Image (cartoon, rainbow, N blue to C red):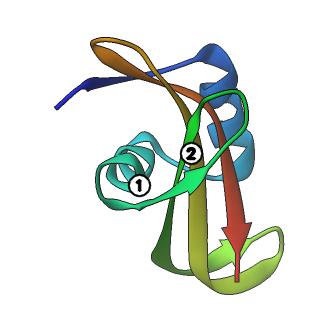
Amino acid sequence: MKAIRFSKHALEQMAERGADEDAVIETIRTGEVVPAKRGRRGFRKNFQYNRVWGGRTYAIQQILAIVAEETDVLIVVTVYTFYF
């Protein structure tokens, strides 16, 4: 299993969008693979959330991690979150 590294941009976006490293790693390891641009791969997974985000309570947080694959490492380029 390849190591996972986070770009500076990904860490900034995670902080801004409410995603933590453990959830992003779980998304990459066990989530659904989806197409992404520029030869990258996306990984998507829904999590039970049941918390407040942006002043509203949401039951589900969906994480979408965009990853560039190198020989021995997966580099998380950016992370998106969606709330339902």
Query: Where does label 2 land, which residue?
Result: 65
Q: Nearer the viewer, residue 80 or 69?
A: 69
**Residue 25 spot, x, y in % from top left:** 36, 44
Position of 22 relative to 69 (above/below): below
Farthest right residue? 55
Question: Which residue is situated farthest in the front direction here?
Answer: 39
Does 69 sit above or below residue 21?
A: above
Identify the residue at image location x=62%, y=29%: 39
Q: Residue at 68% across / 76% down in the picture?
A: 52
Residue at (71%, 67%) from the top-left corner?
A: 82
User: First in sequence: mark 1 or mark 2?
Assistant: 1
Q: Secondary structure at mark 2?
A: strand
Answer above or below: position of 46 versus 42: below
Residue at the spot of label 1? 27
Against 26, residue 2 (above or below) is: above
Location of residue 47 in the rendering, given as x and y in whole percent from the top left corner: 46, 74
- Do the numbered discs 1 and 2 sit on residues whose CB atoms are within 8 Å? yes
* Quarter of the image where one finds residue 27: bottom left
Of the residues shown, which amino acid type is indicated by label 1?
Thr
Mark pair 1, 2: CA separation: 7 Å
Residue 71's x, y, as percent?
32, 11
- Residue 10 location in percent, x, y? 63, 29
Q: Quadrant of the C terminus?
A: bottom right
Q: Please give the name of the residue rendered at 70% of the width and 74% of the height, measured from the top-left corner.
A: 83
Q: Is residue 70 left or right of residue 34?
A: left
Question: Label for residue 56?
Answer: none
Kindly identify the amino acid type of the residue bearing the numbered disc 2.
Ala
